[in-house]
Image: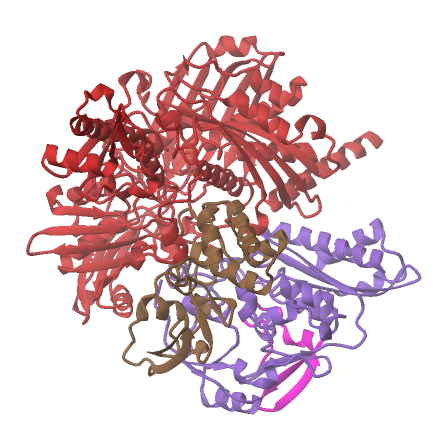
Chain colours: A brown, B purple, C red
């Protein structure tokens, strides 16, 4: 993100991102979505709307789903941030990713990073959720391809493995 | 869309520091979860150079002591139904019904109570608003909802306010003159462009729930089940004695520039909740709400559904009593 | 011989699914482009007006601004239909809708680009604008386009069979006006493009959110006046399309113009608001439908008058208004049809193709009328449909060929699965069941850009590594077409799916393809892939024959190895032998063309609607209606679709569920709205795409009628079920509360108003009785 000449000064922000300690130097008004996508080149987190309306940019902060488009990077100071790129281990999909892949919880894939992160947060909190719990946890994430049917199946499959 | 106008964020450690920060920075805005303010700023509505983040004040992040809730307590914390709120199910339900989980994780009690009013002519990007020569609420001279009038009709659509009004909650306002406690209803004015009665440098520090609340519940209508503001929301607190209504408070949101307590409910006391009683309540609601064309759904729907929900919630409470 | 169908017919996760779930999939806005300029578009605030002046000097002088362009920089118009290319890239002389591009800038960063836009001075003399079809057709309406007086882009008058005799023979006739709001695709990925221009070589590299990179290539060559050979179009991952990205869109051409003007790389990422303004959605449509049946339920005649409000430019309009008439046929045995279609210009963002292109709104009217007629005639809605089934192979009165037809089986399944006979009318107050049928083409039989070439060409490449590379221009936009092609190639060649990779939609590598629209890819590109794989297999068999010292006829291809009697050669050995024999890497070509007899009737516009294979779907919708709030809850959907053969049953199910669900959005909550031409719906908050909380379980049954011309018998799977949902829902609402809603979407406010009106009418009637 570019700064205007009179923009407030940038300051270092330290947080743990996908298992690594990171420091980025951005101004107070830098949004996490821009820091991730532009400064850190982690483009898995998607922008699908003009602010807070679609859930595509959902990331986890201290294991809680948050909208990166309405989160200032400065808020992440000292916290644990996880994006879709941080879920796989040694290149192997985690259980939620695998279930979304195998159950076709993804079609075009654009809502998928946010959807997977929201589902991941749910399963950490509630290992074996009921269908209403799954629906409630994903209520802030819009998908335009699947009708959500196979997304629910994917979360159920992931829970079954867990 | 336009780039976000730059701002600095101050992180006061106490209420006094926050008040001092506001005094030192003309035009600064108070920030909590940002789910309302940051969206508006991204839309180019306002460009405060300084935001004062109330979440850095430990006192405001506390549930308790006693029955106090700090303004920076998140909606998710309230929706999680902590033991302290066990007697206030309408508040829990209202918090749980806001937007989506990620919004609730960020959004706060104070933010929801001080939610900016909304209108189809206002919650837009810069280009869109400039194409209508802006509106009375911000930078313009005409209310496009009622062009011949001189008032902004933008509607308040927070969910927590009606629940707290129905519980008869009080609020704590912090400001240059210190802390004061008032009924929550004193926060609001029926003016979409200035619906919060907060003086310069003042902010909502929290609410205080009353002891021994009446049974209460909250219901709202919206087009879809999440990521949607209420078209109408109704909280009802209802106490019965020997099958008759002995106490009744009805509060509404989504229909007016402010959330408000229904007046004239005394007339509904002393009788049981039956179909005729529900009709009378419905008529009372229909008479006092004044939805305008601030939403894509028809205004008459918001009037009708507010009445229907009031009757339904009251009947459920009466039945459970 | 190896097992028949070892790969196709197996539920197969998408071959590019791992990238999607791990965040590695690179969409257009994700493309790395260090130092790319930021592109921005200045849009008109006027709905209709004559451009007096656009002054860009101050913007151009701003430090950090690398290019500023206006309509003066591109005199040529563009459009998806060669006969109706009337859209300027940037408005010239006249602006016709609020949001139309007027100028564009490329700057070093977003802040500078925004500042530059603010410095552009625009003066427009307003003209009277029309925002409804009725206003546009009024005698005194100002014409948007000088060559189209009355703002009539196209009128269609088709007559097939004896309509008058048909109505005369009918025992029951329903004539009613139905209306459908305009809807939008709202694909999750906002539009984006990345264009690089190399001024030294005069070459353009274009990456964009396109469903049809070939059209983009053609229009770039036209509007930038470039040799097509100087252009390379590459499709990244695409976040959905649903028809929004079939047409070339103005922002793509603008990005390329900016790249050339700045001599560099320009990234243009549209906001969600701009993505909505770019539009191309399904037009607001009014349908006056008259339908006749006999007492036994046989259809006798249909007369339909359809008015579509098309927006400011032609786009796909002519095709949409033709589809609306043509696809009244092809589902049932309908002996007589009169169709009068009117496509109208208005000062609104242009409409275009959207999933179920042209068929959805007329199907709502037709099925809703059938449901009303069934009630009137005392017929079960299923029985009424069964009385009018087609018998394939057949040809409809308007020249549509039907070679396979599984609708009867679809009806049987949804009737049984939903418990229709036992449950309908017995669900209690406020609950109801409704059903409807629908269909869609498996690719338009006649391409828009007629070149004499095949409809689809696929290359298969085999080299030293023994890997099979499918080279196809077909754009996978999330529907899973690349997976289908990989399956088809693996199936024919008898190799594991993992041995096949797909390179899709890079004009420097892949053969031209007409793109992802009208559900053509599985049918046409699938057939071309099979042809290519067969051609490659023949060459492998020829090499195996030499290697095994046997006549070709004696060589058996046994799935990854080749036999001749007792002798066996592995796939790797045969590959080496074939490469040696043919002088290195082998490319086998396969193509597919819809034969002339399938290309539609001989009447004007007769090519639209024609296809080699129709999909068929039936569905039952169960609802609960809250009569106090008007809220409709869809409890469950049962849908069966005849897709010929499910090459990838997992993806077929997903496509059908997605189609039904998109129909639900249109039926319940989605609509655009305009305030004096200014879009009121242009956000994901205001355009009400259903959330997971609003979305029902959707039980899917796949019917395999094995189309004689389809690849492995397959037909389309992703559009046919959409159009059935709105009428099935309306029928369910009628079953639940006894009201026939004739306007989409059936929002709570409309339903509650209708219920209140009925209550008022009832009170009035009772009052009159008492009096």
Residue drawn at point x = 34 percent, y = 62 percent: A43
State whether residue C395 is above or below residue B274. Answer: above
Extreme residue toward the right, this view: B242
Q: C707 or C243: which is nearer to us?
A: C707
- Residue B197, image x and y in percent? 60, 77
State whether residue C516 is above or below residue B18. Answer: above
- Residue C59, image x and y in percent? 21, 66
Quarter of the image containing the N terminus of chain C? top left
Residue drawn at point x = 59 percent, y = 57 percent: A136
Quarter of the image containing the C terminus of chain C? top right
Extreme residue toward the front, this view: C566
- Number of labelled discs? 0
State which quadrant residue C696 falls in: top right
State whether residue C342 is above or below residue C109. Answer: above
- Residue B216, image x and y in percent? 76, 64
Does the image show residue C492?
yes
Q: Residue B123 lies in magenta, yes or no?
A: no
**Left or right: C461, with B22 as reference point:** left
Does the image show residue C691?
no
Q: C309 or C455: which is nearer to us?
A: C455
- Residue A17, image x and y in percent? 41, 72
**Left or right: C192, with B168 as reference point:** left
**Left or right: C614, with C508 as reference point:** right
Q: C94 or A9: which is nearer to us?
A: A9
Residue drawn at point x = 21 percent, y = 47 percent: C233
State which quadrant residue C770 falls in: top right
The residue stretch that appears in magenta? B169-198
Residue drawn at point x = 15 percent, y = 34 percent: C577
Q: Residue B182 lies in magenta, yes or no?
A: yes
């Amino acid at each position: 993100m570019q700064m205007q000449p009179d923009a407030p000064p940038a300051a270092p922000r330290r947080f743990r991102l996908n298992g690594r300690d990171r420091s980025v130097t951005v101004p107070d008004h830098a949004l996490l979505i821009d820091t991730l996508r532009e400064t850190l080149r982690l483009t898995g987190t998607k922008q699908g709307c003009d602010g807070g309306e679609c859930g595509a940019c959902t990331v986890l902060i201290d294991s809680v789903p948050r909208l990166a488009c309405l989160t200032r990077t400065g808020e992440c100071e000292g916290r644990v941030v996880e994006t879709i790129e941080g879920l796989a281990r040694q290149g192997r999909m985690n259980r939620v990713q695998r279930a979304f892949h195998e159950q076709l919880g993804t079609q075009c894939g654009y809502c998928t990073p946010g959807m997977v992160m929201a589902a991941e947060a749910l399963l950490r909190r509630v290992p074996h959720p009921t269908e209403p719990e799954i629906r409630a946890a994903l209520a802030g994430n819009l998908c335009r391809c699947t009708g959500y049917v196979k997304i629910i199946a994917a979360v159920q499959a992931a829970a079954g493995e867990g | 869309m336009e780039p976000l106008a730059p701002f600095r964020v101050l992180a006061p450690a106490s209420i006094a520091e926050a008040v001092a920060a506001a005094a030192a920075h003309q035009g600064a805005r108070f920030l909590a979860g940002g789910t309302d303010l940051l969206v508006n700023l991204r839309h180019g509505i306002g460009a405060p150079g300084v935001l004062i983040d109330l979440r850095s004040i430990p006192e405001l992040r506390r549930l308790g002591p006693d029955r106090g809730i700090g303004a920076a307590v998140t909606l998710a914390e309230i929706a999680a139904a902590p033991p302290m709120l066990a007697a206030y199910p309408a508040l829990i339900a209202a918090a749980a019904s806001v937007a989506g989980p990620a919004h609730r994780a960020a959004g706060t009690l104070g933010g929801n109570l001080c939610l900016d009013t909304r209108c189809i002519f206002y919650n837009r990007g810069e280009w869109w608003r400039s194409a209508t020569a802006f509106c009375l609420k911000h930078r313009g001279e005409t209310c496009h909802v009622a062009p011949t009038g001189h008032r902004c009709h933008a509607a308040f659509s927070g969910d927590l306010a009606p629940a707290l009004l129905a519980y008869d909650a009080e609020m704590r306002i912090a400001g240059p003159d210190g802390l004061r406690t008032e009924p929550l209803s004193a926060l609001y004015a029926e003016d979409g462009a200035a619906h919060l009665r907060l003086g310069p440098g003042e902010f909502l520090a929290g609410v205080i729930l009353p002891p021994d609340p009446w049974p209460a519940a909250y219901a709202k209508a919206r087009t879809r089940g999440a990521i949607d503001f209420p078209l109408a929301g109704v909280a009802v607190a209802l106490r019965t004695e020997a099958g008759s209504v002995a106490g009744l408070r009805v509060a509404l949101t989504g229909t007016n520039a402010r959330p408000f307590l229904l007046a004239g409910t005394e007339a509904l006391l002393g009788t049981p909740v039956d179909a005729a009683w529900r009709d009378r309540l419905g008529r009372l609601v229909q008479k006092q709400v004044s939805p305008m064309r601030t939403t894509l759904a028809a205004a008459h729907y918001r009037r009708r559904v507010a009445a229907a929900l009031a009757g339904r919630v009251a009947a459920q409470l009466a039945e459970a009593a | 011989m190896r097992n028949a169908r070892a790969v196709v017919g197996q539920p197969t996760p998408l071959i590019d699914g791992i990238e999607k779930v791990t965040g590695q999939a690179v969409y257009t806005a994700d493309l790395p482009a260090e130092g790319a300029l930021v592109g921005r578009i200045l849009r008109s605030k006027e709905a209709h007006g004559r451009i007096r002046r656009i002054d860009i000097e101050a913007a151009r002088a701003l430090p950090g601004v690398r290019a500023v362009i206006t309509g003066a920089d591109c005199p040529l118009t563009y459009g998806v239909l060669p006969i109706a290319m009337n859209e300027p890239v940037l408005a010239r002389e006249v602006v016709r809708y609020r949001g139309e591009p007027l100028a564009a800038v490329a700057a070093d960063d977003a802040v500078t680009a925004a500042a530059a836009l603010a410095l552009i001075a625009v003066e427009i003399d307003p003209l009277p604008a029309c925002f409804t079809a009725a206003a546009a057709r009024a005698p005194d309406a100002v014409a948007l386009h000088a060559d189209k007086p009355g703002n009539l882009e196209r009128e269609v008058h088709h007559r097939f069979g004896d309509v008058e005799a048909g109505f005369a023979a009918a025992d029951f006739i329903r004539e009613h006006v139905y209306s459908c709001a305009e809807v939008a695709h709202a694909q999750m990925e906002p539009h984006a493009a990345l264009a690089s221009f190399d001024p030294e070589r005069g070459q353009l590299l274009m990456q964009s959110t396109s469903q049809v990179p070939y059209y983009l290539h053609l229009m770039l060559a036209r509007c930038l006046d470039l040799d097509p050979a100087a252009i390379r179009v590459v499709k990244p991952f695409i976040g959905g399309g649903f028809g929004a990205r079939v047409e070339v869109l103005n922002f793509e051409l603008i990005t390329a113009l900016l790249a050339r003007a700045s001599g560099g790389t320009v990234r243009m990422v549209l906001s969600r608001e701009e993505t909505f303004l770019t539009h191309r959605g399904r037009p607001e449509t009014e349908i006056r439908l008259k339908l006749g049946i006999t007492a036994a339920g046989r259809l006798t005649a249909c007369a339909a008058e359809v008015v579509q409000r098309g927006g400011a430019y032609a786009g796909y309009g002519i095709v949409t208004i033709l589809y609306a008439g043509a696809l009244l046929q092809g589902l049932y045995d309908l002996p007589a049809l009169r169709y009068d279609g009117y496509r109208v210009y208005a000062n609104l963002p242009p409409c275009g193709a959207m999933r179920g292109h042209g068929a959805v709104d007329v199907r709502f009217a037709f099925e809703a009328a059938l449901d009303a007629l069934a009630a009137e005639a005392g017929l079960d809605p299923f029985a009424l449909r069964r009385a009018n089934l087609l018998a394939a192979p057949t040809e409809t009165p308007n020249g549509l060929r039907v070679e396979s037809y599984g609708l009867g089986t679809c009806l049987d399944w949804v009737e049984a699965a939903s418990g229709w006979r036992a449950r309908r009318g017995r669900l209690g107050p406020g609950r109801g069941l409704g059903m409807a049928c629908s269909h869609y083409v498996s690719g338009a039989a006649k391409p828009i850009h007629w070149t004499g070439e095949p409809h689809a060409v696929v290359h298969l490449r085999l080299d030293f590594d023994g890997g099979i590379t499918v080279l196809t221009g077909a754009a996978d936009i999330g529907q899973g077409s690349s997976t289908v092609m990989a399956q088809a190639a693996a199936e024919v060649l008898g190799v594991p799916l993992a041995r096949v990779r797909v390179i899709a939609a890079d004009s420097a590598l892949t053969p031209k393809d007409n793109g992802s629209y009208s559900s053509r890819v599985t049918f046409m590109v699938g057939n071309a892939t099979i042809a290519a794989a067969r051609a490659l297999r023949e060459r492998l068999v020829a090499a195996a024959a030499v290697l095994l010292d046997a006549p070709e006829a004696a060589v058996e291809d046994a799935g990854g190895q080749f036999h001749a009697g007792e002798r066996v050669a592995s796939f790797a050995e045969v590959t080496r032998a074939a490469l040696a024999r043919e002088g290195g890497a082998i490319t086998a070509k396969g193509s597919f063309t819809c034969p002339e007899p399938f290309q539609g009737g001989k009447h004007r516009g007769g090519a639209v609607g024609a296809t080699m294979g129709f999909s068929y779907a039936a569905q039952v919708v169960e609802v609960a209606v809250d009569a106090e709030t008007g809220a409709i809850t869809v409890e469950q959907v049962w849908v069966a679709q005849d897709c010929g053969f499910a090459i990838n049953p997992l993806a077929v199910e997903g496509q059908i569920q997605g189609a039904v669900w998109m129909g639900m959005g249109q039926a319940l909550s989605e609509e655009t709205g305009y305030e004096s031409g200014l879009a009121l719906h242009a956000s994901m908050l205001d355009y009400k795409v259903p959330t997971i909380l609003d979305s029902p379980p959707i039980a899917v049954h796949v019917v395999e009628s094995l189309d004689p011309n389809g690849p492995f018998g397959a037909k389309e799977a992703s559009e046919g079920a959409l159009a059935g949902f709105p009428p099935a829902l309306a029928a369910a609402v009628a079953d639940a509360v006894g009201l026939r809603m004739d306007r989409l979407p059936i929002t709570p406010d409309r339903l509650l108003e209708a219920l209140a009106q009925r209550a008022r009418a009832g009170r009035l009637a009772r009052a009159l009785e008492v009096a």
